[in-house]
Amino acid sequence: MDEVFKALADGSRRRLLDSLNARNGQSLRELCSGLDMARQSVSKHLALLEAANLVTTVRRGREKLHYLNAEPVNAIAERWISRYDRERVHALADLKHALEDTAMDSNAFVYTTYIRTTPEKLWQGLTDPAFTSRYWGLEFATDWKAGSPMVWRQGGADTAGPGQVVLESDPFRRLSYTWHTFTPEWAKANGIEEETLAELAAERRSKVTFEIEDLGGSVKLTVVHDGFEPGSTAREMVRHGWPALLSSLKTLLETGDTLPDPA
């Protein structure tokens, strides 16, 4: 956690975070043009923010786009906020929410976390029903081959659809699939009202991609959930779901236990 606090202590780095807070997913060129800072200085500050995991990057063709990452602040909040007077850590909580909300203000939700595990174990955690049922509460029925259909099994309901498929499957490296179909059965199992279901069903389908990088002794996992329309109801629903879900996955892989349900 020291790296996070050191990174936040510098005013120039906070300005970079503010810039991404205003518009997420910027290239180095865009960040430089919006700030009165030399390119070399911006590069150095971004490197420190990346090292602290406050900024994560995603390549789009030849460009590298920068996104705010809520994971380290989320971890601080989970570790300490519940132990102290919330008024004393109000600023930290505000930062946590700002990072999470901003990631969802762009077309992509991007979240990076580091897990003490192997790519093989992480892949199993993302695909094996015995794992997903423990931290996600659902199972996937698929052979995990690109183009194959997927059935989501959750809350006693099977969710399927012609557009619900595996997009990419490179074991231990990269996995991508379309988000589930919003069916009446799914809505009933999850307590979703008819009005909300109608809004969800009218939106285009989003997709999620998991990028796995072996660091030797640990794994870097980057989750990119994109394809949302502006003002998406689905985006609003998942914006707080991914941090908690990935924290539970991390805990399960590192300790064998899932996070306790919130009181």
Image: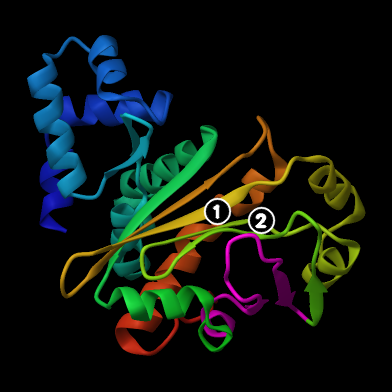
* Residue at image location 41% in from the left, 30% down from the top: 24
Classify mark 2: residues with Cα within 10 Å, few (<14), some (14-19) or many (20+): many
* Residue at image location 71% in from the left, 46% down from the top: 205
- Tag 1: amino acid: Val
Q: In which image quadrant can residue 227 be found?
A: top right
Tag on residue 208? 1
Contact, mark 1 vs mark 2 (Cβ under 8 Å): yes
Look at the image and tell me in which quarter the C terminus lies: bottom right
Between discs 1 and 2, the one toward the N terminus: 2
Q: How many marks?
A: 2
Task: Work out whether 92 lies above or below 47.
Answer: below
Magenta run includes residue 129: no
* Residue at image location 73% in from the left, 77% down from the top: 153
Task: Work out whether 74 lies above or below 153.
Answer: above
- Tag 2: amino acid: Trp
Task: Work out whether 13 lies above or below 51.
Answer: above
Residue located beneath label 2 in the image? 179
Q: Tell me if 172 is positioned left or right of 72 in this view.
A: right
Q: In which image quadrant can residue 47 be found?
A: top left
Question: What's the distance in space between the residues labelled 1 and 2, CA to CA?
Answer: 7 Å
The stretch in magenta equals 132-155
Look at the image and tell me in which quarter the N terminus lies: bottom left
Identify the secondary structure beneath mark 1: strand
Image coords of residue 74 (percent x, y): 36, 57
Q: Tell me if 159 is positioned left or right of 19 in this view.
A: right
Q: Tell me if 214 is positioned left or right of 166 in this view.
A: left
Identify the secondary structure beneath mark 2: loop
Image coords of residue 246 (percent x, y): 44, 66
Q: Pick the residue in front: 221 or 92.
A: 221
Colour scheme shown:
rainbow
Q: In which image quadrant can residue 159 be found?
A: bottom right
Q: Pick the residue in front: 221 or 48.
A: 221
